[in-house]
Amino acid sequence: MTKVTVPLPPLEAGRSAIVEVEGQRVLICRTAEGLHAVNEHCPHQQLSMEGARVRHNSVMCPHHGARFSLEDGRSLSPLTTKGLTFFACAVRGDRLEIEI
């Protein structure tokens, strides 16, 4: 695994944003507990999670409503048993460090 730092996206709790990390797009989600990083493509139909809704400790695909845990990426939906790839991340000043 490689640790990469990117500018910290300005996100309010309940919001998500896409960042480019090492040539791949990563979805950053902010909950009341902090920031989480997951693969940008929903495993249900490989569509972008851009615009995903964040509720409590889960993220919901904007296309079909598949939900995933922001603790570890596992599926919380009957639409798919596949989870999102979860990346460890930490805030370092005004940057976000992500393990890819």
Image: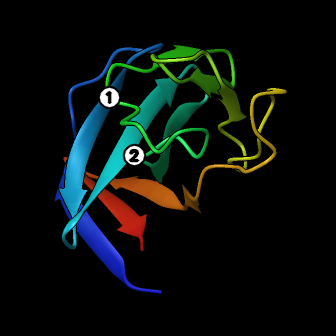
Give the percent coordinates (x, y) of residue 36.
Answer: 51, 43
Please tell me how crowded label 2 is: few (under 14), some (14-19), or many (20+) other residues with Cα within 10 Å: many
Left or right of 6, for residue 81: right
For image coordinates 47% across by 57% down, the residue present is 89
- The residue to which callout 1 is attached is 50
Q: Nearer the viewer, residue 71 or 80?
A: 80
Reply above or below: 73 against 10. below
Reply above or below: 41 against 57. below
Give the percent coordinates (x, y) of residue 31.
Answer: 54, 23
For image coordinates 54% across by 62% down, the residue present is 88
Give the percent coordinates (x, y) of residue 39.
Answer: 46, 52
Badge 2 or badge 1: first in the primary sequence: 2
Left or right of 49, for residue 23: left
Q: Nearer the viewer, residue 14 or 46?
A: 46
Q: Amino acid at mark 2?
A: Glu
- The residue to which callout 2 is attached is 40
Reply above or below: 46 against 6. above
